[in-house]
Image (spheres, grey):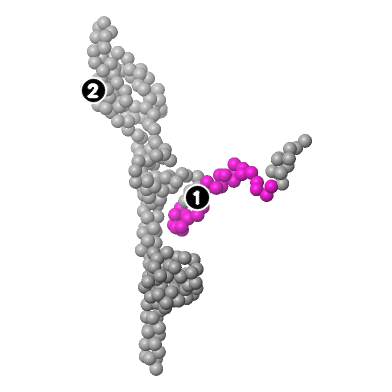
Amino acid sequence: MVSVRRRRAQKSSVRKVSRKSKDKFRKVSNFGNPVIAAHWDQKLTLSQNYAKLGLKYKLGRKAGGSEKKVKIIKPIKVDDDGEDLDGAQDLDMDEEEDELKRPEDDPNFDPYDPANILEGTAKIIKDKDGKTEKIIFGTKKLNKDKDEEEEDKEEEDSQIEKTNMIIEQLEARSHKAKKERKMNEFDMEFLNRLNAKYGDDYEAMKWDKKLNPFQLSPGDLKKRFRSWCKQNQSEEYEEEDSVYADALDS
């Protein structure tokens, strides 16, 4: 038999939050900027999206959200004479002889030169008794194929162009003049009454329960009167302009 608590939970209007609805809550959907909203990818993290847009999420160090490119270096098996044991197994035998030439085929090639040993690997020099005399660490950088380098460069160039385009759109939007917010008629009438009775005495306005029913503080009233003064001045200028225009028409 179902317990009273479970029966009550089934009748409740508040449903249990499922995993699917939780995922929807995590998504960023409220964008204040239409340019960012148009180029936002929900599959990427916040920092990845900012990097794609040419922006920086944090001024400090990265705390995650970015993938590091890991280079995999295959170890080279070398015998006592310094020759590669693997040979040219990975190379295609149908290629031309010029492509099969390796630096190791050069008679002046020194296998124990750090510049000829891959970075991250080392070679050990031993004496006749098998004791280690010296360990030489490599300094040679792993070079990519030309095709891979060209592809990476094309991807970087396209990403830079896209990022520059987004930044230009954001800069163009930032130069637009901000729309001034106007006070409504209720606030204007409310401040007109206070100004008519108290003038600039904000401390006295604070204690008037009839004209200041919301008990606004002196600081809050001062801010409201600043915008009230600006709006009154702009309205006066508009009236003067209209009178001047009517005089010219007549």
Q: Quadrant of the N terminus?
A: top right
Number of numbered labels in the structure image: 2
The residue depicted at 47 percent of the width and 44 percent of the height is 44
**Residue annotated with mark 1:** 28
Estimate the x, y position of residue 238 in percent, counting from the top left.
Answer: 39, 81
Give the amino acid at mark 1. Val
The residue depicted at 28 percent of the width and 28 percent of the height is 140
Disc 2/disc 1 C-alpha distance (Å): 55 Å
Sequence-earlier tag: 2 or 1: 1
Quarter of the view holding residue 143: top left
Q: Residue furthest right?
A: 1
Q: Give the mark toward the camera: 2 or 1.
A: 1
Residue 70 seen in the current view = yes
Q: Quadrant of the C terminus?
A: bottom left
The residue depicted at 43 percent of the width and 40 percent of the height is 65
Q: Residue furthest bottom?
A: 250
Few, some or many residues within 10 Å of mark 1 (<14, 14–19, 20+):
few
Point out which mark residue 41 bears: none
Q: Residue furthest top?
A: 129
Quarter of the view holding residue 168: bottom left
Where are the magenta residues, as a range?
12-39
**Residue annotated with mark 2:** 113
Name the element at disc 1: loop
Estimate the x, y position of residue 200 in percent, counting from the top left.
Answer: 36, 73
Estimate the x, y position of residue 83 in percent, counting from the top left.
Answer: 31, 18
